[in-house]
Image (cartoon, rainbow, N blue to C red):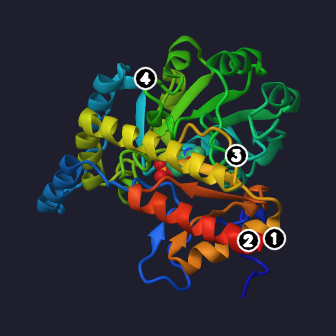
């Protein structure tokens, strides 16, 4: 039974389109290579793995509830104030805290046309109305975002670099957005892919100077800890203080806290992952461009490949699956002629290039 006459979910809940996760299986192909969820092909730092295993020795005890050791480690590595960091079960949980804290019935939550789908899901779960502002050439458009703001706009989510487009807009544009938002609106800068750009602080410097900007970060992408579910947020005292009232005391597990602490401290390993990603991203992008599959410059660990039309993108997706390669169909993000391909290791990148070369030969024959 899909509905009950008397037991009724809160407004907005039944309008949610459930999140669609990247596929992890494929028809045909013996070994499956998953390139659909932007996971790190090199896995987490060995130190993070060891810390997670060690945490198994004390599973009967509740984890830290203030997350102080992890917040201190993050603050030290990134040069931030530990008292204004909040940890969550993935940055998805921080996104949910923000929506539950600042948006409700009658309020609007704004994001870009090809924005991460959790923004709309969490907004609707809080009873608020999700609103998408148009992009220009697959890039966030600050003027369009500002034009979409009104007295009801409570949150503005922007990932920079963005998923699934992989594109980025300059710090000056982010600053202009923050400066011109209506007074009741909080800007949330989603830095899920910030670590893939050398020397980039995810706009933490803007958080330091303004009281209407929050940054979210994750251990799921470059740190290779997607399975542990841990992320964090950084913001002004008034925001972090409010979010901590919504947060459950034991929202993050002991293993995740220990693994993340070791991961953020292993700066050498993070650099290695960044370098490998940049190398194979450039290689794959140019290999695909040569065979007629273009993509915009990506600043993250995936590329958004463009095909001539949706039919061709679907056929390419199906063909890749026959070769054991699972990529992300992004039709649900309004990009039916595109496929998002995570940058795997060398073997995976070469396999994708060779499979798509065969596909294109077949398509043109
Ligand atoms: C992957 C991703 C997240 C992070 O999700 P977690 O809950 O931390 O695993 C957040 N935002 C964007 C844009 C992402 O692509």
The residue that disc 1 covers is 311
Question: Quick one: SS at disc 1?
Answer: helix
The residue that disc 2 covers is 314
Q: How crowded is mark 3: few (under 14 residues within 10 Å), some or many (20 or more)?
A: many
The residue that disc 3 covers is 115
Question: Which residue is pictured at 79% across the width and 33% down the height?
Answer: 153
Residue 96 appears in the rendering:
no
Where is residue 44 shown, x and y percent of the image? 30, 51
User: Farthest residue toward the bottom?
Assistant: 1
Where is residue 238 shown, x and y percent of the image? 53, 23
Tell me the tag on residue 80: none
Image side of residue 179 versus residue 45, left or right: right
- N-terminal of the two: label 4 or label 3? 3
Ligand 1 contact, mark 4 (Cβ < 8 Å): no
Is there CB contact under 8 Å for labels 2 and 4? no
Within the image, what quadrant is residue 27 found in? bottom right
- N-terminal of the two: label 1 or label 3? 3
Quarter of the image with the N terminus in it: bottom right
Ligand 1 contact, mark 2 (Cβ < 8 Å): no
């Amino acid at each position: 039974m899909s509905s009950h006459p008397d037991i009724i979910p809160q407004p907005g809940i039944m309008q949610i389109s459930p999140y669609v996760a990247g596929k992890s299986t494929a028809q045909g192909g013996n070994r499956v290579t998953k390139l659909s969820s932007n996971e790190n092909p090199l896995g987490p730092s060995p130190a993070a793995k060891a810390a997670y295993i060690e945490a198994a020795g004390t599973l009967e005890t509740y984890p830290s509830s203030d997350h102080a050791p992890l917040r201190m480690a993050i603050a030290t590595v990134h040069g931030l104030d530990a008292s204004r960091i909040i940890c969550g079960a993935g940055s998805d949980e921080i996104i949910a805290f923000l929506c539950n804290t600042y948006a409700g019935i009658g309020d609007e939550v704004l994001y870009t046309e090809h924005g991460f789908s959790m923004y709309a899901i969490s907004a609707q779960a809080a009873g608020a109305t999700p609103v998408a502002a148009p992009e220009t050439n697959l890039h966030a458009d600050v003027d369009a975002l500002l034009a979409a703001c009104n007295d009801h706009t409570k949150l503005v989510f922007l990932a920079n670099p963005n998923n699934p487009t992989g594109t980025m807009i300059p710090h000056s544009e982010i600053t202009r957005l923050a400066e011109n938002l209506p007074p009741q609106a909080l800007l949330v800068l989603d830095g899920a892919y910030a670590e893939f750009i050398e020397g980039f602080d995810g706009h933490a410097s803007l958080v330091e100077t303004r009281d209407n900007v929050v940054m979210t970060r994750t251990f799921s992408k470059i740190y290779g800890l997607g399975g542990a579910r841990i992320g964090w947020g950084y913001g002004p005292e008034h925001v972090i203080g409010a979010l901590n009232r919504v947060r459950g005391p034991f929202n993050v597990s002991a293993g995740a806290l220990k693994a993340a602490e070791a991961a953020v401290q292993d700066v050498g390993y993070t650099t290695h992952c960044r370098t490998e990603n940049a190398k194979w991203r450039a290689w794959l992008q140019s290999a695909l461009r040569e065979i007629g599959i273009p993509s915009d410059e990506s600043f993250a660990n995936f590329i958004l490949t463009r095909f001539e039309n949706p039919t061709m993108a679907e056929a390419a997706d199906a063909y890749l699956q026959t070769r054991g390669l699972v990529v992300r169909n992004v039709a649900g993000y309004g990009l039916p002629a595109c496929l998002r391909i995570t940058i795997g290791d060398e073997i995976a990148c070469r396999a994708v290039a060779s499979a798509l070369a065969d596909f294109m030969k077949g398509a043109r024959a």
